[in-house]
């Protein structure tokens, strides 16, 4: 994705090339995947004026050949950066200024990198990568739309079968099983937080009986490397009038905040709108309103208090207000949103309070 645009950024920063690597196939470098479509172990070298190439170990060579990058070299030496240095020199590529993504470059790797590129100066390219990934291409939008559709169908099936689950961990296991059954991956470990556990936004489901009250289910899948993210809150038992009212208030705020999305609006303005509408419940809203979604589940833009980001065409992001009452309950309603001249809600599972 956006190889030529990235090379423009390299020239602006006076960099000869960018170097990305993945050392563990279970922790794919998001930028390496974004620019190459390759999710295996290896190195991606992107010169500022020449064709990019991948260096992959023999066991991953065929997989690398099936990526978007035409040039693939076999990693002859044991260490990544030895092979990279040798191939860069053979191709007569200047390497005085090298761009790296410091967010995905460990200190140990940097030590080995510097052994091979002793005289090279490094410049961080993480922000430029994040900004490029912020605006989605038409192809990315179609993949994200499908990813959200899969998340919807799995979540609907889970809610439909909710009465058959005895524990929080059973619900989480069902979400994961249905995901894997379709040949997909999870965007993140699902959150299933029942009763007073729902007051913790990042709660990890436990092998305990599902408690009466609200149950927050936060879930997403990865389709072709792209994430979806959706949260629904159901009620197990019989809600009080106050609980129904609080849920109704949050749902109205979530829907109203989606309606106010327009081109170039400040993300902080949408966040402020939600805080103001929450009134006395504002102190119970303890996290950001949303985040970008793409090859990572948390990308730019950031819909937070002091965010300088603005909504632009072809952005995909979440809107997820929540209220949390310590040791009592929590409610969160989250959708993945596409803005492209108008708002499109990509996650379509019903938001009406479902009482089980």
Image (tube, helix red, strand yellow):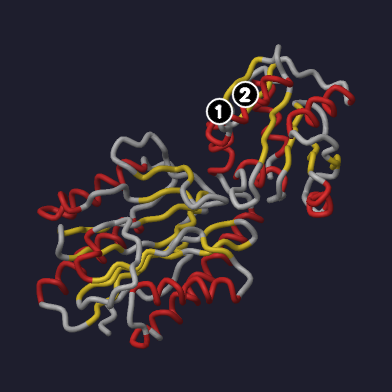
Give the side of residue 93 with respect to residue 111, left or right: right
Residue 131 is situated, as x and y percent measured from the top left of the image, at 54, 37
Question: Can you identify the residue that label 1 sits on?
Answer: 107
Viewer-closest of 278 and 22 = 22
Pointer 2: residues within 10 angstroms few (<14), some, or many (20+)?
few
Q: Residue at x 38, y 34 (%)?
A: 308
Give the side of residue 115 with respect to residue 250, left or right: right
Above or below 68: residue 93: above
Q: In terms of image quadrants, where is residue 93?
A: top right
Residue 335 is situated, as x and y percent measured from the top left of the image, at 40, 62
Q: Quadrant of the N terminus?
A: top right
The residues tagged by marks 1 and 2 sit, at their Cα atoms, a distance apart of 6 Å
Viewer-closest of 136 and 70 = 70
Residue 311 is situated, as x and y percent measured from the top left of the image, at 44, 44
Q: Quadrant of the C terminus?
A: bottom left
Viewer-closest of 111 and 325 = 111
State the SS at label 1. Answer: helix
Q: Residue at x 29, y 80 (%)?
A: 354
Pointers 1 and 2 in contact (C-beta within 8 Å): yes
Q: What residue occupies the far front of the structure in this picture?
A: 78
Numbered label attached to residue 214: none
Numbered label attached to residue 111: 2
């Amino acid at each position: 994705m956006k190889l030529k645009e990235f090379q423009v950024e390299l020239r602006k920063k006076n960099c000869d090339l960018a170097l990305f690597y993945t050392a563990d196939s279970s922790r794919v470098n998001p930028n390496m995947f974004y620019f190459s479509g390759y999710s295996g172990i290896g190195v991606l070298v992107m010169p500022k004026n020449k064709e990019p190439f991948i260096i992959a170990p023999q066991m991953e060579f065929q997989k690398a050949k099936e990526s978007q990058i035409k040039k693939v070299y076999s990693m002859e030496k044991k260490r990544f950066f030895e092979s990279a240095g040798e191939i860069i020199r053979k191709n007569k590529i200047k390497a005085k200024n090298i761009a790296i993504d410091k967010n995905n470059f460990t200190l140990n790797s940097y030590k080995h990198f510097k052994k091979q590129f002793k005289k090279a100066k490094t410049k961080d390219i993480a922000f430029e990568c994040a900004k490029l990934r912020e605006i989605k291409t038409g192809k990315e939008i179609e993949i994200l739309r499908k990813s959200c559709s899969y998340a919807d169908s799995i979540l609907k099936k889970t809610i439909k079968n909710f009465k058959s689950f005895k524990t929080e961990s059973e619900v989480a296991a069902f979400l994961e099983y249905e995901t894997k059954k379709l040949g997909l991956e999870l965007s993140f470990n699902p959150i299933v937080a029942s009763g007073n556990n729902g007051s913790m936004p990042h709660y990890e489901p436990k092998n305990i009986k599902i408690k009466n009250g609200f149950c927050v289910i936060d879930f997403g899948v990865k389709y072709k490397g792209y994430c979806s993210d959706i949260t629904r809150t159901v009620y197990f038992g019989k809600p009080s009038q106050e609980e129904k009212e609080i849920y109704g208030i949050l749902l109205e705020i979530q829907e109203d905040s989606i309606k106010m999305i327009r081109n170039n609006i400040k993300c902080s303005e949408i966040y402020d709108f939600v805080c103001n509408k929450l009134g006395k419940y504002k102190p119970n809203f303890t996290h950001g309103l949303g985040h970008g979604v793409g090859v990572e589940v948390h990308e730019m833009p950031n819909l937070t208090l002091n965010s300088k980001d603005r909504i632009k065409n072809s952005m995909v992001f979440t809107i997820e207000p929540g209220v949390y009452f310590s040791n009592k309950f929590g409610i969160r309603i989250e959708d993945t949103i596409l803005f492209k001249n108008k708002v499109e809600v990509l996650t379509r599972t019903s938001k009406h309070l479902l009482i089980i």
